[in-house]
Amino acid sequence: MSFSDLIPWKKNSTDIAVQKDSGDPFMELQRRMNSLFDDFWGDFPTPLRSMRTLDSMGDFSPAIEFSESENELKMKAEIPGIDEKDIEVELSDGLLTIKGEKKTERKEETNGTSYSECSYGSFRRSVELPYAVKEDNVSAEFKNGVLTVVLPKNKEAKSKSKRIDVNHN
């Protein structure tokens, strides 16, 4: 083995990973530390290698999707790995907020050696609704990691909505 084999960026010059810069120095530090630990643990045989696969939420923000019909708004949020009891939905002054928390604990015992790891994370996402809804009739359902919130429009919202045709020249 030569000295140049020990330099990670010289191993294979075509394998250069491009990361999006978030502009947050702490997130960059976290990414680099994760990379260092991944490189370190990757050379060990299982079970140590399997410990680094534990899910972590960190700065998790669920993907949301809105759809609209004549009578209602519908919001869907992908929140995998969280129990229904750990999700909260709130509607206040036209602001829809979903929040949740994930707690994962994992213990593994192999050949008389015990391994333990914990992971905690939370999220909060708020969206301002485009118009008033019937707050008493709002419903939410959580199934297979997808939260669906149905927000019925009130009569004023229905009457204010008008479709405008776009001319094609």
Image: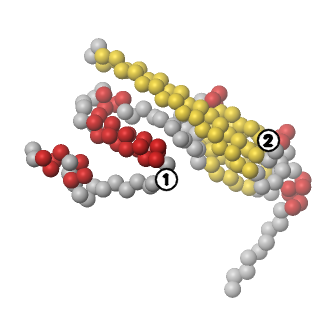
Q: Which mark is residue 151?
A: none
Q: Nearer the viewer, residue 131 or 84?
A: 131
Image spot of residue 19 (x, y percent): 40, 54
| 4 shown above or below 33 | below
Q: Nearer the viewer, residue 2 or 38?
A: 2
Q: Which mark is residue 23?
A: 1
Crowding at mark 2 (Cα within 10 Å: few <14, some 14-19, many 20+): few
- Which quadrant of the figure has residue 168? bottom right
In the picture of the structure, the residue carrying the numbered disc 2 is 92
Is 76 left or right of 162, judged from the image as shown?
A: left
Q: Secondary structure at mark 2?
A: strand
| 54 shown above or below 8 | above
Which is closer to the viewer, label 1 or label 2? 1
Mark found first going from the N terminus, 1 or 2: 1
Crowding at mark 1 (Cα within 10 Å: few <14, some 14-19, many 20+): few
Residue type at mark 1 is Gly
Distance from label 1 to label 2 (Cα)? 32 Å
The residue shown at (46%, 47%) is: 25
